[in-house]
Image (tube, rainbow, N blue to C red):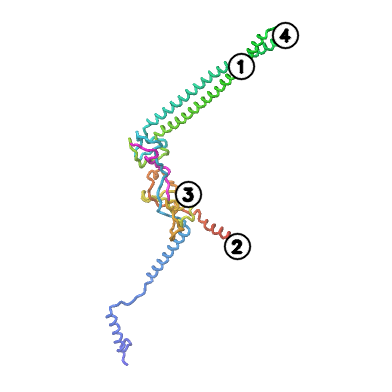
Amino acid sequence: MVSDSTGQTPDQGVAQDGTEENTANSGQPARKGLSGKAKRNLMIAAVLVALGVGLWFLRYETYGQYFQETNDAQIQADAVAIAPKVSGYVREVLVADNQDVAAGAALVRIDPSDYDAKVAQAQAQIAQANAAVENAQAGIAEQQAAIAQARAQLAAARAKAAHDAAEVRRYTPLVASGAERREQLDQLKLAATQSAEQVRQQQAALTMQERRIASMQAQVSQARAQGQGAKAQLDAADVDRKATLITAPITGRVGDKTVRTGQFVQAGTRLMSVVPLHTLYVTANFKETQLALMRPGQIAKISVDALGGTEIDGRVASLSPGTGAQFSILPPENATGNFTKIVQRVPVRIAIEAPASARKLLVPGLSVTVTVDTRSAKGDLEKIEDDQEAIEAKQEH
């Protein structure tokens, strides 16, 4: 067999040339494996991804899972609705819209003319009652003088009756002995009888005069009671008159003012509101699944949309005693019909601890996002589980 200088037979060379020719005709490049540098880069990327996931998981387990966040939160304030205690025409409105007022500042003045008249009427009734008391007391003084006179007349009548009775006793033996005439004794006896009757009349007159004193004293008491009633009416009228000047019960800012000068207002009609901007707070409605570790006093961060997302400090003040649905007008009744479990939300009050520069920009109704740091209670769930296991173990024994 003849071979060329390459050591291949002519047939093999033809076959190899044909293979190369076929490869060239197919137009497909030969497959090549990843270079060492590419493999190294992929390994580094995989390690970095794994490291990042691990760091995220570690941060979540030790830090992130204890931060509860909700954007279902608004700034609120305990605004006071201003309403008059009495009815009348508005004489003067003393504040403007959105004006800051201090506690006790005058807001609205109602025409006090009707209430001034009631005060004057009550004062007149008091004067009338006082005059009645003085008149009754003067009558009592006169009656006491009449009683003294009646006592004197009774004493004189008793003295005369005693004298007449003594004369009868003295003349009786003389008449029996014939020293005096019987007619004289009869006259003495008649005088003694008349004297005794006069004593009884004077005694009855004295009793009647003394009883009139009691009646007059009752009149004094009645007049004084009328005076006290008039004094109570005066106090009530004075309270109503003072109520015509409506003042601010708290320090705050006037809002939603609807009252106008000359308007007739009824008692209890809302005229405006005073919003205490210095005591703003946040009501954050957290899901029930977020409350396991939430406790009063925990630190919160408040992101205010109106401040471009700027965060201000806050603190958990309290948790509502029930879910929002429980305090709605129509609370749910799950004992009837079909039941679909819905995650409930519980209002949580967050006290705002922002600087004055931020507080002056906050108003009720603004939307915020609240994040609460619950790490201070991270061991509570384990303690609850341990307590439950202890109870179960005790029940088994």
How many marks do you count on the picture?
Answer: 4
Q: Quadrant of residue 388?
A: bottom right
Q: Residues within 10 Å of mark 3 (few under 14, many from 20)?
A: some
Kind of residue at badge 1: Glu
Residue 32: name its quadrant: bottom left
How far is mark 2 from mark 3, CA to CA? 38 Å
Residue 197: mark:
1
User: In terms of sequence position, does the residue under pointer 2 or pointer 3 come before the other?
Assistant: 3
Question: According to the image, label 4 marks what residue?
Answer: 177
Q: Residue furthest top?
A: 179
Q: Earlier in the sequence, mark 1 or mark 2?
A: 1
Between 303 and 250, the one nearer to me in the picture: 250
First in sequence: mark 3 or mark 1?
1
Which three-letter amino acid code belongs to the residue tagged 2?
Answer: Glu
Q: Nearer the viewer, residue 154 or 286?
A: 154
* For the residues bearing labels 4 and 1, Cβ distance under 8 angstroms: no
What residue sits right under mark 2 in the picture? 396
Disc 4 and disc 1: Cα gap in Å? 30 Å
Residue extending farthest bottom: 1
Q: Tell me which amino acid carries mark 3.
A: Ser
Q: Amino acid at mark 4?
A: Ser
Q: Nearer the viewer, mark 3 or mark 1?
A: 1
Kindly tell me whether residue 144 is visible in this rendering. yes
Left or right: where 204 falls relative to 284: right
The residue stretch that appears in magenta: 263-283
* Relative image position of residue 390 (x, y in whole percent): 58, 59
Q: Nearer the viewer, residue 222 or 241?
A: 222
Secondary structure of the residue carrying numbered label 4: helix
